[in-house]
Amino acid sequence: MLEVKDLVVTYGAVVAVHGLSLTVKAGQSIALLGANGAGKTSSVEAIAGLIRTRSGRVSIDGRDVTGHPASTVVRRGLALVPQWRELFRNFSVEETLIAARTGAAGRGALPLEQIYALFPVLAERRRQIAGSLSGGEQQMLAIGRALVTNPRVILLDEPSAGLAVGVVRSLVGIVRTIRDSGVGVLLVEQNLEIAQAVAEDCIVLSTGREVWRGPMREAMALDAIRDAYFA
Amino acid sequence: MAEFIMVIIGGVQFGAIYALAAIGVVVIHKATRTVNFAHGGLVMLGAFVTYLVVVELRWPYWTAYVLAPLLIGTLAMALELVILRPIRRADMFTVIMATIFLGIALSETFRLAQNTEMLAVPSAVKGPPMIVPLGEDAFIVTAEQIWVTIGALLTGFAGLALFRYAGIGRSMRAMASNIRGAQLCGFSIDRVYALAWFFGGALAGLAGVFAAPSKGVSPELAVSVISAAFVAAVIGGFDSLIGAIIGGLLLGVVETLSAAYVSSAMKSAVSFLLLFVVLLWRPDGLFPERKGRDV
Amino acid sequence: MTSHHPVTRRSIGLALATLAGLGLLPRGAEANSQGVSKDEIVIGALGALTGATAFIGAPGRDGIQLAVDGINAQGGINGRKLRLVFEHAFTPAESVAAAKKLVESDKVFVLILASGSTGAAAAADYVRETGVPTYNLYGSTPIIRKPFAKNVFHSVVPPAEISGGKMVDMIFEAKPDAKRVGVLAGTYAFPQATKAGLLAALEKKKDVKVVVEEFDQGARDFTSQLLSFARQRVEAVLVSGSFSEAGFAIKQAPEKGVTNMTWVLDGSAVNDAIIPIIGPENTKGVYGYFNVPYFPAQLDPPIVKYNELWKAKYGAPPQGRPNVYDIAGYSSTFVLAAALKKAGTDLSWAGLISAWETVKDAKPSDFGGPDVAFPESFSPTDHQGNTRLGKAAIKDGIWQVIAK
C-alpha cells in the first residue's frame, strides 16, 4: 500500500505540488488528472524518489521512503514507468529486463517468462535493441522493466502518449491485468477514456493543488475536467 | 624488413599500455560522465605499488598483479567518495578542474615522498632476447615485449568483457545509457559511481604494473600516460572501450614509426597530428556511441 | 651639527654594512668574513631536492650534512662548529636566486654548489662577481671552470676532457679494433659538457667513425637513436646522461636489433638503480667510470663504515641511495674542513682561498671519517681537487670498481 501525505515539491521558488495526499491500496487503481503543468509528473516523480520532495511523507506498506533515492524506493516495492520511458536504447529487450532484475535483486524479482507471457511481443523481440523498437513496443518494455522489480505499487506516467489507438487498447487490458493481480496502480493520464477504463477513483490537480477527488464516473461531469481536457 | 617488424613490435608494446590506461578513462567517463585527468596519477601509483611489492618487499611478481588493482581501485573509489561526490552536482568545468588538480596532487605527493629521479622496476619475465629468422635477416623480440603486449591486451579485453557482459558492467552501462532509467531499475548512483571508479582505478593499477619496467616509476610517468590515454580515448570515440584499445595501439605504433623514420622529437607532435586527422575524418572518433534519447 | 660622540669602530662597520647593503661598495671585499662567529662557521649549499636532478642535489645535501655532523662531533674546526644552510634550486633561475640568497641574506662564509652542471653554470657569473669561496662538487661544465677563477675550487668531478678521455680509453680496452663508435648524449648541460670531452678524445683516434645521437632529459624511448646505431653498425656506445636514460637505452637495444654492444657510461649513470632496468643478466659489456674508489654496495671497510654512518642518520636507504653524490658530498666537506683548518685564525674569504690553495692530500680520515674518495690536492694554479677515476663494471649484480 502506498501512502502519500502532504507532499510538497518545489523548483526553486516555484511550488509545483502543494500538499498532495493519497493512498493506493493493493489491487486499487487511481487516476491523477489535470491539465499540462498541473503537477502530475512532479507528484509521481517525487513519490518515486527521482526528484526531491520539499516536505511531506511517502511510505510503502508502512515503511517510510521519504527522501530516499529512486533506487531505494524501487527496492521497497514502488516502480515508476516514467513519461519519457527512459529506456537504455543500446540494450536489447532481454538485457533491459535482466538489468532491472539485477538492480532490484533481493526483493524477489519476477522471472522474465512472466513478463514475456504478459507481453508476447517482447518475447518475439527479445534480441532486438531497445532504440529500434516501435513506440508501443518501447512502452511495453518500459512497463515490463518496472514489473520485473515485482512492485507492490506501480506508477504510470501517461503511458498512452503518442501511441496508436490499437496499441492503446491493448495497453488498457495490460494495466487491468496488473491491477487485478493485486498491484496498486497510480495512473497519470491525459486520455480520459483510458483513465475511465482503468481507474475507479481519481484526483484532479490544478496548478499543483488538489481541486477535486471522487469516483471516476462523477469526474467526467466536472467543469475543471472539461476545461482541462476538452477546452 | 626486420627493422620495420621490430619497430612495430615496440610500438604495439607501448600501445598496449596506452590502451589499458585509456580503457580506464573511458569506463569512468562512460559510467559517471567525469573526465578523469587524475588517471595518469593512478597509473603511476600502480607502478609504485609494483616497485614496493617487487623491489622493497621482494614478494613474487604476481602479487603486484593482484595488489595493484585492488589498492589503486580502492584509492580511486575513496577519491570519488571524498573529493568528487560533494561536487557531483557542480558544472562540468569544476569537476574537470578537480580531477586535474587531483592528478597534480598525486604526482607531487609522490615526488615529495620519493626523492629520487626514478624508481627502477625489473621485468616480470626474464630471458635472453629471442632471435627470429626472417629470410636472410632476423628480427629480435624480448620475453618482456611479448608478456607486456599480450598481458596488457588480454587485461584490456577482460575489462571490456566484464563491462559488456557481467552484472557489474551492466549497472555501469545502464547508468551510462540513461541515469534516470538506471535508478528506476534499482541501481544506486552512489554505488555505481563507486563501482566505476573502483573498476577504472583497478585498470589504471594494472596499467601501472605493466608500464613500470619499461617506463620506470616517476611523476613523469603520470604525465606521459595521461596524455597518451587521452589521445587514445578520443581517437576511439571516448565512450567506446574497443575504440580505446584500437586507439591506444594505433597511437603506440604511429608514435614509434615516427620516432624511427622521422625523428624522436616529432613523437608527441605526431600523436596530436594523428588525433587531428582522425577527428577531421571522423569527428566522433573511430567508434562513436549513438547518443540522444528517443521520444 | 657636530658630533660629540667619538666615532667608534662599530659605527663605521655599521655604516659600511649599510652601504654594502645598498650596493654602494665594491663587492669581493678581501676582508669579508661573514658567516664566521666565535663558535660557528656557516656554510651554504644549493642543489635540486625535487625534479629531474634531485638524484644529485638531495644526496649532496645529505652527504654534506653527514660530514658536518662528523666534523662537529670531533670538536669542529679550531673550536668552531660548522652549520649547513641548504637551498633548493632546480632551474638555472632558481640556482642564481639560491646563490644570492645564501651569500647576501643567509651570509654564508663558503658556498657549495651541490647541483649538477645546470646549476653550476647558472651560478658561475654570480660567484665570480662576489668572490665568495665556492666549492663546485659535481659540475663538469666548462662554464664554471673557464676562465680560471681564484675563488672557485672543484671537487671529485674532473673536467669533461679528463672523464671523456677515460671513457674513450675504456672502449678500446674492451674492443681494441673498434672502428665505429656511437655517442649518445642528453641535450641538457651536463651530458653536453661530457659530449664535448668525448668528441675531443675521439678526434685523436685515427680511422674511427663517430655517430652522434641525442635525447631529451627524462627520455624513455630510444627507438630512433638505437636504429641509427644499428644501421651504421656501431660497435661501442659512449653514453652521457642519467642512470634512467642510459638504462632504458641499453634495455631497448636488443629490441631494435642492437646486440653484442660495448657500453661505456658517464659517472652520472653509474648507479645501482640501473641494474633492475637493464636486468642483471644483460649487464655484460657495460662499463663506466666512478668518481670515487668504492661503490656503495662494495664490501671494502671504508665504504662499509660509511654506509653504517649513513643508515644511522637517515635510516633504510631508498633505491639507488646512497649514491656517488652522497659519497662525494661527504668527502668533499672534509676537504673544505681541511682548508678551513689551514686558514687558522684568518677566517676571511682571502684567507680561506690562500689556505685552500696549499691543501695537499685532504681526506675524511684527517677528521676521523672513512676515506671513501680519492684524496684531494690544490695549488694556486690548479683548483681541481681530484683527477682520478675508477673503472667500473657490473659484477655479481652490483657495480664494482675493477681498476683504480
Image (spheres, coloured by chain):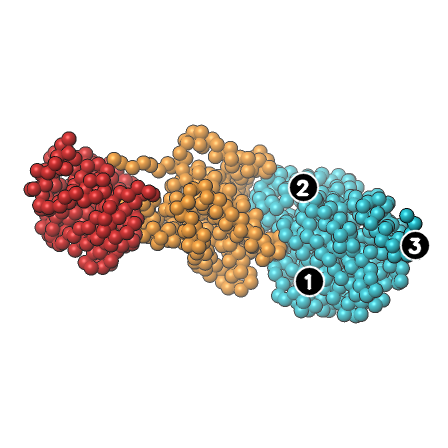
Chain colours: A red, B orange, C cyan
Q: CA distance from mark 3 to mark 2?
A: 66 Å
User: Quick one: which residue is furthest to the top in this view?
Assistant: B281
Judging depth in this view, the residue of B118 and B152 nearest the camera is B118
Which comes sooner in the sequence, label 3 or label 2?
3
Q: Residue at x 26, y 56 (%)?
A: A65
Name the mark nearer the viewer: 3 or 2. Answer: 3
Q: Tell me the residue that label 3 is attached to.
A: C4
Q: Tell me the residue that label 1 is attached to.
A: C296
Q: CA distance from mark 2 to mark 1?
A: 29 Å
Read off the chain for label 3: C
Read off the chain for label 2: C
User: Quick one: which residue is furthest to the front in this view?
Assistant: C1
> Horizontal and vertical percent for residue B14?
50, 45
Which comes sooner in the sequence, label 2 or label 1?
2
Residue kind at label 1, given as amino acid type: Pro
Q: In the shown orientation, is residue C54 left or right of residue A6?
A: right
* Mark 3 surroundings within 10 Å by alpha-carbon count, few (fewer than 14), some (14 through 19), many (20 or more): few
Dots 3, 2 in contact, CB < 8 A = no
Judging depth in this view, the residue of B128 and C193 nearest the camera is C193
Q: Tell me the residue that label 2 is attached to.
A: C187
| SS label for mark 2 | loop
Judging depth in this view, the residue of A171 and A184 nearest the camera is A184
Q: In the shown orientation, is residue C247 left or right of residue C97?
A: left
> Horizontal and vertical percent for residue C220?
58, 46
